[in-house]
Image: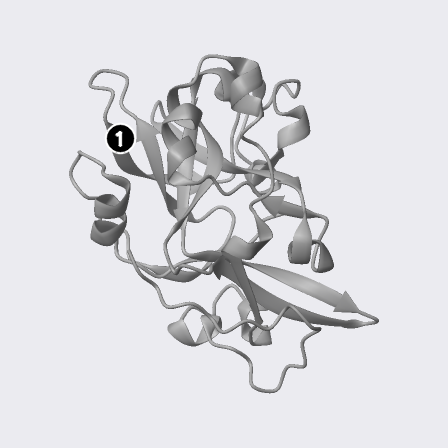
């Protein structure tokens, strides 16, 4: 699953990296993004075909929902069932997006203890995670636009932390995901990232508290003892 992530770069840096064409939204970086909070999403503009960077709320609310109370539970969508689940199938067909992030957090359980880890691209570049977005008309008539992050079975070292991981799309697959029409070809993109592309390192337990939000959250925890293979140097943020 992906229940917390960090976006350390500015909206302007993300807009330049993804080549978006609309006005840059004003959303400050977050080192502890949680469901129901606002996040940046890259969508294909239906008129121009260009990429737009927009602010949506994390936790998908299906168009047919009576209310938005279950949004937090819709933070993720399983890639294996995304074309079957009523909450996601229409969005998969018509409203796919990229969710930019600099990395995500996962917790490793050993006995009663839980050690949080950060995961980022070893290159230091932003991640582009496969996502879906939806619009829901609120009782006051205003539209609430929300998103979910698609997950797949974990592979490589990620499987030491959790059995699921977000789908991280390389740049060559961005347009295929955003505008592809062949369902089988699009579904084939929902696979785990190559292990050698990823870096993992233990971080402080402060990340478990949503109110904590500062750059120190992504620093290596000097007191943590990590298993072999889960203690890479945290990558520089580039791109």
- The residue beneath circle 1 is 51
Q: Residue 201 is drawn in which quadrant? A: bottom right
Q: Is residue 151 left or right of residue 27?
A: right
Judge whether 39 appears above or below 146 on screen: below
- Badge 1: few (under 14), some or many (20 or more) residues near its Cα, within 10 Å? many
At 50% from the left and 12% from the top, the residue drawn is 182
Secondary structure under badge 1? strand
At 55% from the left and 40% from the top, the residue drawn is 167
Q: Residue 114 is drawn in which quadrant? A: bottom right
Foreground pick, 160 / 56: 160
At 51% from the left and 63% from the top, the residue drawn is 210
Foreground pick, 44 / 232: 232
Q: Residue 112 is drawn in which quadrant? A: bottom right
Farthest residue to the front: give it: 196
- Whether residue 137 is visible here, answered yes or no, is no
Q: How many marks?
A: 1
- Whether residue 128 is visible here, answered yes or no, is yes
Judge whether 43 appears above or below 153 on screen: above
Residue 86 image position (x, y, % from top left): 62, 18
Residue 129 image position (x, y, % from top left): 47, 41
Residue 38 image position (x, y, % from top left): 39, 46
Foreground pick, 55 / 68: 55
Residue 43 image position (x, y, % from top left): 33, 30
Question: Which corner quadrant holds the C terminus?
Answer: bottom left
């Amino acid at each position: 699953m992906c229940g917390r992530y960090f976006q350390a770069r500015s909206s302007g840096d993300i807009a330049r990296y993804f080549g978006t064409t609309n006005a840059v939204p004003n959303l400050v970086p977050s080192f502890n993004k949680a469901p129901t909070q606002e996040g940046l999403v890259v969508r294909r503009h239906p008129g121009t075909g260009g990429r737009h960077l927009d602010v949506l709320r994390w936790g998908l609310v299906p168009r047919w929902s009576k209310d938005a109370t279950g949004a937090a539970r819709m933070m993720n969508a399983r890639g294996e069932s995304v074309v079957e689940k009523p909450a996601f199938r229409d969005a998969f067909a018509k409203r796919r997006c990229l969710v930019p992030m600099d990395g995500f957090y996962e917790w490793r359980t050993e006995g009663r203890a839980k050690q949080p880890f950060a995961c980022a691209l070893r290159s230091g570049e932003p991640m582009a995670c496969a996502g879906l977005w939806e619009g829901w008309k609120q009782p006051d008539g205003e539209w609430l636009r929300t998103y979910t992050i698609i997950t797949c079975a974990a592979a490589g070292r990620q499987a030491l932390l959790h059995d699921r991981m977000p789908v991280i799309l390389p740049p060559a697959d961005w347009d295929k995901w955003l505008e592809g029409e062949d369902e089988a070809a699009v579904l084939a993109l929902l696979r785990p990232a190559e292990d050698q592309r990823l870096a993992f390192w233990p971080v402080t337990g402060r990340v478990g508290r949503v109110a904590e939000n500062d750059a120190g959250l992504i620093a290596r925890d000097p007191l943590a003892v990590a298993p072999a293979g889960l203690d890479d140097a945290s990558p520089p943020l580039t791109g």
